[in-house]
Image: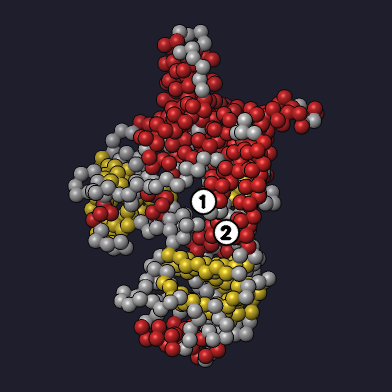
Amino acid sequence: MLLLGVGRTPGPGALDPVRLLPEPGAQLALELQGRLLEDPRPETGGGCRGILQLEGGRSQGRTELRLASCPLLHQGWRVRVQGQLSSLRPAPHPLLAGPAERLGRQGVWSRLRVEQLQVLERPATPIADLRRRIAERLIAAAGPERGGLLAALVLGSAVVPLPQELRDSFRVAGLSHALAASGFHLSVLLGAVLPLGRSLGRPLRLTLAGGAILLFLLLAGPQPSVVRAVLTGGMGLLILEAGRRARPLALLLLTAVVMLLLRPDWLADVGFQLSVAATAALLVTARPLEQALHPWLPRWLRPDWTAPALAVPLAATLWTLPLQLLHFGVVPLYAVPANLLAAPLLTPLTLGAMGLSLVALLAPPLLGVLLLPVDLLARLLLLVAQLFAALPMAQWQTGRPLPLLVLLLSLALLGWLVPGLGRPWRRWGTALFACVVAVHLGLLSGDQLLLVHQPERDLLLARHHGRGALVSSRSDGFACHQARQLATGLGLQRFDWVVLLDPVAAADPACWQGLTATLLADSEQGPPLLSGQRLASPGLAVAALSPDSQALRLEVGSRRWWLLPDRQAFWAWERQGPAAAGAAGSSGLWLGFAPRPAERQRLQARGAPRLVWWSGAPPAHGPLPPGWRASGASGSLLASGA
């Protein structure tokens, strides 16, 4: 509910290694030394990555290390590395998550591809070793899925190597909060510790609770959601022990302000935003919503239990809805029933995981025996997540709305979520909500052609009346991943069809097949479409221009574009004569390469369409003709119309 996503990420400091680069996009052979801030993590395509905190020398700051293999390296070790330093490339389009945006929130602005590595020192890192030992022993005892789940309930998913399938299931089912260390996990820990100190004096009782809070912070790490929970819980405990009445909402606001004063960059952290919004939901809306639900529930559902069980996930879902739309463009459709079934499992499972962590550290041989009852609960929670994630429309892809629409949506929901605002606010809120939905649906249903260009990779996405189609110059997994991100951000469940122009076969065709039922790919036998062939769906069509090139004619509603991915396609298009040059109602032309001056002159002489795009940097000298646009080395272009 809180629109904190507009915070700006700070830039690199004066001594950051990125300042050593002569210009953006340049590379520099460099030797750096520093301390690893995390255990290097394996990459999907092979190799490892980790973050290095630099020390001494000409530069300070942080850089991301990219290693071709995964050597034995641990958090806290001091290393010396040699390799090629480069700046991080920003995302070519706002719907795509680029490394510059992802790592910039951690103060990382450069990347070093490591060629040589030397370990200088292996200092003692007791906290990191403790986390690693807990995770390794639980995973060894219960397997990657259930053991990883138990470790995440204690340490948080940010520091536990969880299988991607497990993360995806919990995310789609709306249960990601169960894996992220947060206030819930701290409340479970304090709920187990505080009863033990009832008979103790206040100093010992506070010491016991403070030790539990400190242990939680050390194990989970100083993540924004963890720090928020620790500060809120600690201040609330002190207020209650002093015999005063705590004001939870004021305490939450004070905690958020203090955190942002200390770390302004946390304003842009999605975990911090969701944590604050969900906590506000429990404090402001959950109780009134429970009272409102109670008379509507039939007696056989036991309203005394069902109403509060429904009110908590429903309030949290509504408060975090604007943030879900702003950042992800998807809504877990079954989040409320999934949380309703998962809630009875989470508290005993979290307590059991915490107990097993102690056993894993103090008496590992007993872990196999004591694991059995907790393992059953873990299986049930995994089953709940997998069942709801497998349901049709488990993720409702609404598309990412404009930030202004998200702000208006938040104002519209206030009348229903904040008690005491009265009926007039709710009436205005309902009307505003309807307007926001209408505008967003109108934007999604319009015709649009989007070009996303990166070095040696182009994606052209066409939309018509809520449908979509894609032409990609590459068939690798990274291109498929980006195509999926674009589809999600634009509210497309699947593409009507996908055309791959890459002569190299896709390494993972299942990824592309998950995006569309109609996939055409280039091959050694020829282009994906032969001359005269046409692939069409309502309002979207593509046809081959010639038998000896990849030149295509794309139709988006009433508009027609020529797609010329290489010079061979350009020459084939030229041979078609004036009719193909755009005089017969063509809306635009795309070149997958930067045209030479002579080629630009021939385009103008033949009466090229009013819109001409090309993938690459604009010319160094001279302005472009009206309607001509270059994507830059990495960027995007957009054409919209009726």
Q: Secondary structure at mark 1?
A: helix
On screen, residue 9 above or below 610: above
Q: Residue at x 32, y 63 (%)?
A: 25
Q: Position of residue 295 (x, y in %)?
A: 76, 28
Quarter of the N terminus within the rendering: top right
Q: Quadrant of residue 567?
A: bottom left
Q: Quadrant of residue 38?
A: top left
Q: Is residue 112 visible?
A: yes
How many marks the image carries: the answer is 2
Q: Which mark is residue 403?
A: 1
Color theme of the render: secondary structure
Q: 66 or 393, which is in the foreground?
A: 393
Q: 17 or 273, which is in the foreground?
A: 273
Quarter of the C terminus within the rendering: bottom right
On screen, residue 600 above or below 347: below
Q: Position of residue 536 (x, y in %)?
A: 66, 74
Q: Residues within 10 Å of mark 2 (few under 14, many from 20)?
A: many
Q: Residue at x 45, y 75 (%)?
A: 627
Q: Position of residue 292 (x, y in %)?
A: 70, 30
Q: Which of marks 1 and 2 precedes in the sequence?
A: 1
Q: Which mark is residue 136?
A: none
Q: 382 or 549, which is in the foreground?
A: 549
Residues at circles 2 and 1 in contact by the CB criterion of under 8 Å? no
Q: Which mark is residue 490?
A: 2
Q: Residue at x 35, y 35 (%)?
A: 262
Give the amino acid at mark 1: Pro
Q: Position of residue 76 (x, y in %)?
A: 32, 39
Q: CA distance from mark 2 to mark 1?
A: 14 Å
Outermost residue on the left side: it is 57
In the shown orientation, is residue 45 left or right of residue 537? left
